[in-house]
Image: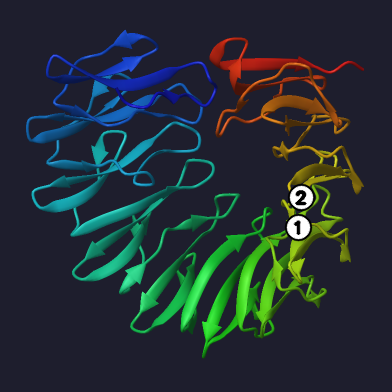
Amino acid sequence: MGTPIISPNGKHVAYTAYTQGKWHMIIDGQMHSGFDNASPPMFSPDSDHMAYGVQYGKKQAVVLDGKIGPHFDGILLRPGQFKFSPDSSRLAYIVAKDEKMALVVNGKMDDSYDAVAKPSFSPDGKRLAYTLKKKDRWHVSENGKLGPGFDAVDVPLFSPDSKHVAYLAQSGQKMLLVVDGQKNSQWDAVANPIYSLDSRRLAYVGVNKNKWLMVIDGEDGERFDRIGAFKFSPDSKRIAYSAQDGHEWTMIVDGKKQERFDIVSIPVFSPDSATFAYAAKKNDLWKVVFNGMPGPAYDTVTMPAFSPDGNRTVYMAQKSDKWTVVVDGQEGPWFDGTSLATFSPDSKHVAYLVKRGQAWSLAVDGLPGEKLFIGGVKGAALVFDSKTRFHTLVMGVDGHAFARVDVEIAE
């Protein structure tokens, strides 16, 4: 039996099962036709569609919503190469036929090429780009329009508004960024292009002669020994990135250098973009920095997070073998362990798991609950269903191996 796959809305479950010499797909408890082989299922983002690959003898096909598509010599079913559009209206996958490769979208095959890879939908689902190899040159095809040829091209990146597309390309020993079909400056190396949320700004890392710099809105920044993580603020007006000079790292925010540390983490902005934060290590101790002001030192800290309204902060901190949750700069009770904390939708409450001895429980605003369990389920989120009610999945509670625990917060 394959690992059960749950739909995004949590209402459907599907998995593969082998019996009587055939593979079957079990969907919501119902067994579907047997095949010589079957891939794990994949649900669309809206959970209304499901697709999986199957094999008949030497041929392969895709089953979409119970209907078997055309047969091919092979189908590439790896993650990232077999995907639904964000609006769930289209399914794209790569096939092999007659020693060529092609992209199939909703059962319709595009032109064949020597190689095809990396399909990418725009956020609105209306545009589709992918890479292809033709006569020893790699191109990006975007809605049927073929871009210039290169020695190599990377995954196409669409802007949040779906109006622009950018990708990295290699030409000889040089690399460059191509934006809307236009070539930018060449570098020894280029990496990590990102768009701002309003899609009006673009930033990426360029490297020449072992010096790294940020290229922001087409302007070269200061050169460093290395550039780390970088991020635009939610309002798209600000940008922060980490940079290494010698053996030390610093955060550059709006072009201004912050305090130097041995290590700095990914930058985080508050939802209103007014506050930036990051974790930093110096002399074997970690601190969380808010708007340039370092907090108390701990053996370990987690990444800081903001409440939905942007007015509150939280992170976990460790001293020796004890953990605490620091909310709005104030330490809570110390425990043997904690999970990542989650704010309620109205930002008034903070919920998380805590460990006391060998038992875990759910805590709200620093107060542990009475129901004990062995631990949380890996990957299970703590989900607020309302301002005062949340749930999560745990192990070993009330005699059950796995169970959902619901908590109502008394106001």
Residue drawn at the location 32% of the way across and 15% of the way down: 26
Q: Quadrant of residue 217?
A: bottom right
Assign a secondary structure to mark 1.
Answer: loop
Q: Exactly how many numbered labels are in the figure?
A: 2
**x%, y% of residue 228?**
62, 69
Q: Which mark is residue 299?
A: 1
Name the amino acid type tagged 1.
Asp
Taking the image as drawn, is residue 218 in sight?
A: no
Report the front residue among 299 and 12: 299
Taking the image as drawn, is residue 113 in sight?
A: yes
On-image quarter of the C terminus? top right
* N-term mark: 2 or 1: 1
In the drawing, does residue 14 fall left or right of residue 347?
left
Q: Quadrant of residue 409?
A: top right
On-image quarter of the N terminus? top left
**x%, y% of residue 345?**
80, 29
- Residue farthest along the front direction in this orientation: 357
**x%, y% of residue 93?**
30, 42
In the drawing, does residue 390 fall left or right of residue 47?
right
**x%, y% of residue 405?**
67, 16
Whether the residues at callouts 2 and 1 have beta carbons within 8 Å, the answer is: yes
Report the front residue among 248 and 243: 248
Name the amino acid type tagged 2.
Gln
Residue at image mark 2: 318
Residue drawn at the location 81% of the way across and 42% of the way down: 324
Assign a secondary structure to mark 2.
Answer: strand
Relative to 181, residue 306 above or below: above
Relative to 159, residue 49 above or below: above
In the drawing, does residue 349 fall left or right of residue 33?
right
Instruction: Report, in whole angstroms, how far the alpha carbon at label 2 lies from the one at label 1.
Output: 6 Å
